[in-house]
Amino acid sequence: MQEQTMERMKFLVDKLNEYAYNYYVLDKPTVSDYDYDKLYDELVQLEQTTNTVLPSSPTLRVGGEVLPDYKKVVHQTKLYSLNKCNDIQGLKKFVLDIESLVKNPKFTVEYKFDGLRVIVKYKNGLLYEAATRGDGIVGEEITEQVKTIKSVPLKIDYMGDLTVAGEGIITLENLAKYNKTADEKLKNARNAVAGAIRNLDPKVTAKRNLDVVFYDIISIDDKHIDSQQKVQEFLKANKFLTGQLFEVCQTAEQIKEIIDRVDKIKSKLNILIDGIVIKLDNLAMREEIGYTTKFPKWAIAYKFAPVEMTSMLKKVEWNVGRTGKINPIGIIEPIELAGAVVSRATLNNYDDIKRKNILLNSLVFVRRSNEVIPEILGLAQKFDNSTQIQKPTHCPSCNQKLIEIGINLFCTNEFCREKQINKITYFASKSCMNIVGLSDKIITTLFDLKLIRQASDLYKLSKSDLEGIEGFKDKKISNLLHSIEKSKNCQFNNFIDALGIDGVGEKTAKDLAKKFTNLDALKCATFDELVEINDIGNVIAENIVDFFKSKSNLLEIQNLLDSGVTIEQQEKKEVDLNNFFYNKKVVLTGTLENYKRSQATKLIEDRGGEVVSSVSKNTDCVVCGSDAGSKLDKARALNILVLYEDDFVKNL
C-alpha cells in the first residue's frame, strides 16, 4: 500500500511539473486550472498522510521558514562580468578583433536582462543549490528562494552534475500586479528581483512571482557541447526558460540590425532589458581567446542609452499635492537619460531620503523607471560640502505647520494656495470634469486674481470676470465659458473622481459608481461596505468615509450641485433573477485561463452579482484560478463554495 502511494505521489509530481512547464515556460497551458488544482490538492493530502515531500514536488514552491542567515558559496570557476560598448564603432572593433583570431566566426545575439544573476546546480537530475554571483568568486546561497520560482525546474532529464547561469527577472505585468495589493510598492523591476531573491524569507520570493531566464552552462559532466547554439538547445531540452531573442550572425552589420530593431521595441517588452549580449558561438575557440582580469575577450554587451546615471543633487524642492501631501523633488545637474534631458527627479518622501542616505551637494544615482519617471535611487558619492537634507516643518506654500501621517508630511490648511490650485486642476482634468482649455496656468492666474478659490467657483465665472486679463480675447473667453458650461452634465464616476478623495482615482471612482449608483448612497457608505469592493483597502475606505464626514467637503459638493452640476445616475441593468450569480457576493482569486479579471468581474456584475475583494462569512462563492493563495484557503476554512473555471463558465 505504501509503495502504491509513493508511486502515485511520483506520478502526481511529474504530471504537475509537466503542466507547470507548459504554463510558465512555454506559455501554452495544457490543462484547466480546475484539473491542475485537483491533482495538486491530492498531492498535498498524500504528503500530509505520508509525512513525505519528494525533492521536486511543486508544493515546495510556496516557500518555507525564514532562513537564519546567508551561507557563502564558492563558485567552481570565476564568474566574469561583460565588457561593454554603446556605438557601432565599439561593436565593429569587437568583431574585427575576433575575426583576427577566428576564421569565419559566428556570433550569437541575446537580450541583456536587467535583473540579478543566479547560478543553479543540479545533481542526479535534481536542483540542490543556487547562489548569487556575488563578487564572481564567492556568492550567497539562495537555494530555498530559487525553489519558489515556478519557471525554474526542480527536476531535469539530464542526470550528470550541471551548473547553469541565468538572470532573475520579474515581468512588468507581474510587477504591476504585485504593486496593486502591496502595502509598500516596488519602484522598479530590478530592485523588485534583488529584494525578493536576496531575502531571508522565501515566502517573499514566492509572492513576487519571479522568473529566471537561463542562458549559459558553467559546467557539465560527460557531455560534449561545443557551441552557444547547442547550449541553447540543451537548456530548452531540459525545460529551462530561455530568452525570447536568440539569433546567429556573422557580421557587425547583421548584429547592428538586430540591435536597432530591439531598441525600437524595448519599451514595449514585458521585461526590463538594458542591452544586447553578443558572444562568439564556438566554445572551444572561446577558451583559446581567453579572458582579461575582468572580462571574457569573446563576448561583449551592447548597452542601450542609459536609464540610470549619476548626477549632482543641487537642492530639494518641497511641493504640495492636491491632498496636501508634501512631495520632495530633487533638482539635479541636467543629464541625458534614456533619450531625455532630466533636471528634476522624485524623492518620494522624507523617510525615503533618510533610508537612501541622500545628501545635498552629493552625487546620486538617477533612474528613469520604465523610461518615464525619473527617480533618485540612492547616494553614489558624498563630498566635504555634502549636507543633510532637512525635514520641513511648515508648508512651503502657506507656511502652516505640517503634520506627519505615516511616512508622509501633510498640509491641513484648506485654503493653502498650492493645494487648492492642484485640487482645481485635477477637478478640471480629462478623467474628471473634462473642462477643455482650462490649463493649470489659467487656473493659477484665476486663483491669484481671486476669481476662484475652489472648484465650484469655476461655475460662477462670467465674461466680465475674464475680460481684461492678459491673453484673454473674446474667442478664448467664449470657448472657456462654453467648456465650463458643458462640463456641468457629467457621469457619476467622473464626478466622484473630480472630488479628489485621497487614493481614489479613475478606476476606483468607476467601482464606487457601480456599487452605489447615486451620490446619497455614496455619502452614507460604511467602511465595511467599501472594503468589500475589489481593490479598495482599509486606508482608501477610511479616506472615503472621512471625506464625507467633512462639513467643508459636503458644502463644496452642495455648491457644485447648486451651480447646476447634474450627475447622470447609474442605471442598473435588468438581469435574470434566476441567474446563479444574482444577488451573490463573489470573490475572484488567482489567474483565470480564459478571462481577464476585469472581464470576469463584468460577467458577474451583468448577472446581478457583486465582486468583492475579501473573503468573509458573507461571501457566497469564490471563483478560483491558478496561483490562488490565502483567499482560497480562507474560503475552504469557512466552507464557502469554490468554483473553478469550468464550473464558473457553466454557471454563467
Image (cartoon, rainbow, N blue to C red):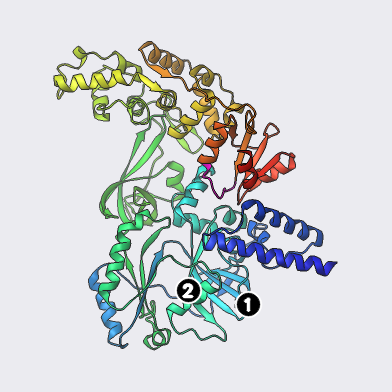
Q: Does residue 49 appear to the left or right of 563 in the view shown?
A: right
Q: Secondary structure at mark 2?
A: loop
Q: Residue at x 26, y 15 (%)?
A: 461
The disc labelled 1 sits on which kind of residue?
A: Lys
In the picture shown, does residue 311 fall above or below 127? above
The mark tally for this picture is 2
Q: Which mark is residue 136?
A: 2
Write down the region rendered in magenta. Answer: 590-598
Figure quadrant of the C terminus: top right
Looking at the magenta stretch, what is its main secondary structure?
A: loop
Mark yes or no: residue 198 visible. Answer: no
Q: Which mark is residue 69?
A: none
In the picture shown, does residue 596 fall above or below 97? above
Q: Residue furthest top?
A: 562
Q: Nearer the viewer, residue 101 or 244?
A: 244
Q: Residue at x 57, y 28 (%)?
A: 530
- Identify residue for label 1: 123
Q: Nearer the viewer, residue 28 or 438?
A: 28
Does the magenta portion include 597?
Answer: yes
**Alpha carbon of mark 2 to alpha carbon of mark 1: how far?**
22 Å
- Please provide percent x and percent y for residue 247: 37, 72
- Please provide percent x and percent y for residue 320: 36, 32
Q: Earlier in the sequence, mark 2 or mark 1?
A: 1
Query: Neighbour class for label 2 at 10 Å: few (<14), some, many (≥20)?
Result: some
The disc labelled 2 sits on which kind of residue?
A: Gly
